[in-house]
Amino acid sequence: MLDGVAVTSLARTWLDLASIFAVEDLVVIGDFLVSEHRRNFGPPRKAKVPLAELRRYVESKSSLPGLARLRKALALVRVGVDSPPETRLRLMLQRAGLPEFRPNYPLCDDSGYPKVWADLGCPEFRTCVEYEGEHHLTPEQQSSDHDRDFMTLSLQWHQAKINKTDIKRGEGHVVGKVSRMLTLGGWTPEPRAA
């Protein structure tokens, strides 16, 4: 009940949307529902629906429209994402066959203290990706980003910064930028079948 009106749960609403939304859109919504983190700055974020609860809910259902699509989406949902563009970027990189990037990944100093929280991090190849939306254009945010970029470099991570112009240029452009940073981190792409 919400203000005296009967409403469905967030999990049920997600299930209902599965009959009309594409898998990627369902992943964006799922990432939003389960997003939580406790960083060493800012307030902690609590999941609207914990991932384990969302899994149990979906697993308890059968023979419903969109359920197969929802199960595909659930397998791609990750905890810690801060924005829909980050989810879409992560999925783009995954579709391209790049190593998996983890949302809100801490880049730590030698003592294990998080100095930077990368939007997406691939620790195996010390590579991170930052999605820079409109709010990154303010002088204050640019100063903060400059400090983040300096710290990322000093921690010897390879950073790819992606913005909406990169996205408009296409998947090949974005994947190329990120692949270059992964290669600097020691990754070798698998040869493509002819």
Image: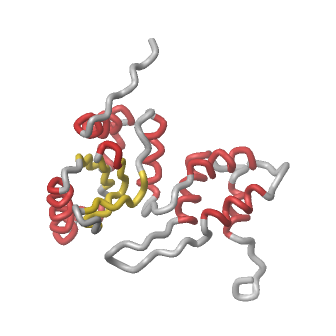
What residue is rendered at 64% in x and 50% in y? Answer: 21
Q: Residue at x 53, y 59 (%)?
A: 31
Tell me: 39 left or right of 113.
right
Judge whether 58 appears above or below 167 on screen. Answer: below
Q: Quadrant of the N terminus?
A: bottom right
The extreme front residue here reads 111
What is the x, y in percent for residue 89?
41, 47
> Which residue is rendered at x = 31% and y = 40% of the image?
178
For the residue pair 12 and 44, the one nearer the viewer reads as: 44
Query: What's the residue at 64%, 63% (across, down)?
Result: 52
Task: Please give left or right for residue 119 compared with residue 183 in the image.
Answer: right
The colour scheme of the drawn protein is secondary structure
Q: Does residue 103 appear to the left or right of 110 in the view shown?
A: right
Residue 93 vertical position relative to residue 62 in the rendered view, above or below:
above
Residue 22 x, y percent position in the rendering: 62, 46
Residue 97 is situated, as x and y percent measured from the top left of the image, at 45, 33
Residue 11 in the image: above or below residue 182: below
Number of numbered discs on residues = 0
Q: Quadrant of the C terminus?
A: top left
Left or right, residue 54 beside residue 62: left
The residue furthest right is: 63
Q: Which residue is farthest bottom?
A: 3
Question: Residue 83 placed where, x, y %?
Answer: 43, 61
Q: Nearer the viewer, residue 127 or 160?
A: 127
As rendered, which of 21 and 183 lies closer to the eye? 183
